[in-house]
Image (cartoon, helix red, strand yellow):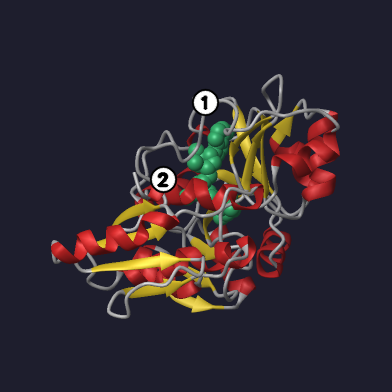
Amino acid sequence: MKTVITSNVTKAVEILRNGGLVAFPTETVYGLGADATNVSAVRKIFHAKERPYDHPLIVHIAGIEQLGDWAQDVSSEAMKLAQVFWPGPLTMILKKQLHVLDIVTGWQDTIGLRVPRHPVARSLLHEFGSGIAAPSANKFTHISPTTAISVYEELDDEVDLILDGGDCAIGLESTIIDMTSTVPTILRPGVITPAEIEDVLGITIRSSRQDKPLVRAPGMHHLHYAPKTKVVLVETKNIANSVKKLATQELPAVVVTWSDVVLDADVSQVKMPNDAAAYAKRIYQTLRSLDAQNYQVMLVEHVPDGLAWDAIRDRLSKASQ
Ligand code: TXA
Ligand code: MG
């Protein structure tokens, strides 16, 4: 099987209808999609990603009008969030409709639903007309791809077609909120913050910051969002010392910073933006390209405390475990 990289949406729809795999761009990261109603097609996703079957998939739909096809007993709060944040980087966990395949939901009675806003994803979903089950298009526990080429490098020829939609604008996976719990609960932080959701709902929600451990926390596998090279998080004030230590051990290292900390000229350093959105957009691509070089360690500067950095802090801390 040979992967085709193209912008031909009609061809992608044909492949989905025939039970094949299509990687497609979303505003967050690239997804690895299959017809959510076709068991053997969905099984191919797990095979390509080498992902355990108990990790459920998000079903992507074209719009709020398809919500009832996949979820039942949708609360007025969930409807409000859909109206405000869709299309966009919000995934809601809802009670599933009976027909939804067990392989999609990991044998749970809930389903993760999202309407992406990337124009290529939107036209794919409109033309396909039904739900597309899609996790991020990377091998299990690796970094999510944010370009078409990274998808190809991750999955080789295990995907029939990759829709090229350029670089993902956000660069980190969607915010996941469980709307089936008594109090809505954030299961995975993303660019849509708890404060924005609380503003819309007018109630206090729960987020992983306040409440640990979480029950069905996605991405809670001990290693996730991780490059192969060891990642060590370092506070700004300790960077210079850590670099010195590594130098005495003669370990080839690279330092990823965002502040204006100045290091010796002979240390490899990658300077990231000091703005959270710009940092998020670049971080996976940066880790991916550093991973392809021969470093033994990546020292990554702790990111700032602010809410806007929550999703980034979450992914970096998982990458470093
Ligand atoms: O931005 C995103 O969300 C991307 C794009 C492609 O949409 N998708 C993505 O999918 O990140 P994935 O599979 O890599 O991460 C989705 C997470 C998984 O950790 C999974 O466990 C969780 O969502 N999830 C899916 N359905 C769930 C459910 N019914 N209950 C609890 N967690 C669920
Ligand atoms: Mg993923």
Q: Quadrant of ligand 1?
A: top right
- Label 1 amino acid? Lys
- Element assignment for label 2: helix
Instruction: Specify the farthest residue to the top.
Output: 182
Name the residue: 34% across, 58% down.
Answer: 227
Name the residue: 46% across, 41% down.
Answer: 219
In this rendering, position of residue 154 left or right of residue 56: left
- Element assignment for label 1: loop
Say the numbered circle drawn on residue 173. Answer: none
Taking depth in this image into account, of 118 and 203 the one nearest to the observer is: 203
Work out whether mark 2 precedes mark 1 in sequence or the reverse, and give the earlier one.
1
- Label 2 amino acid? Lys
Q: Locate the C terminus and report the quarter of the image it occupies.
A: top left
Say the numbered circle drawn on residue 318. Answer: 2
Q: Locate the N terminus and report the quarter of the image it occupies.
A: bottom left
Q: Which residue is mark 1?
A: 212
Q: Quadrant of residue 269?
A: bottom left
Taking depth in this image into account, of 128 and 246 the one nearest to the observer is: 246
Q: x and y percent of residue 105 in the render?
A: 53, 34
